[in-house]
Image (cartoon, grey):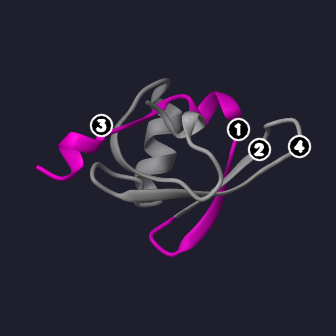
Amino acid sequence: MTVYDLKVGQKGSIDNINGNVKLAKRLLALGCINNTEIEVKKIAPFGDPIIVRFRGFDLALRKSDAKNISLKQRSEIYD
């Protein structure tokens, strides 16, 4: 499951950032690290961008970038 799969109001816990190194470094610098809770706040009409909130601030992500942020499965979160 990825951030792209979440609906507005749903939350998840970050497991991994895939994709290019530039994206990973940018998100890591913003505090988007493993086990960080992320929530989808708004999705644009055509699905791009997606507004997410983590660590108290909102960030606009492209669909392609949201697909590269893997989330933990629910059972992993509560273990």
- Closest to the camera, between mark 1 and mark 3, is 3
Disc 3, SS: loop
Q: What residue type is labelled 3?
A: Gln
Residue holding disc 2: 49
How far separated are the C-alphas under marks 2 and 3? Answer: 24 Å
Q: Are marks 4 and 3 in contact (CB under 8 Å)?
A: no
Instruction: Give, as a three-letter code, the residue at label 2.
Output: Pro
Closer to the camera in the image, 27 or 13: 13
Q: In this view, does 43 lie above or below 59?
A: above
Name the side, left or right, on which 28 lies relative to 61.
Answer: left
Q: What element carries label 1?
A: loop
* Residue that numbered label 3 is attached to: 73
**Residue, x 29% and y 43% (percent of image)?**
74
Look at the image and give the residue range highlighted in magenta.
54-79
Residue occupied by mark 1: 62
Q: In this view, does 78 lie above or below 57?
A: above
| Quadrant of residue 37 within the rendered picture | bottom left
The residue under label 4 is 45
Percent across and percent down for residue 47 are 79, 37
Contact, mark 1 vs mark 3 (Cβ under 8 Å): no
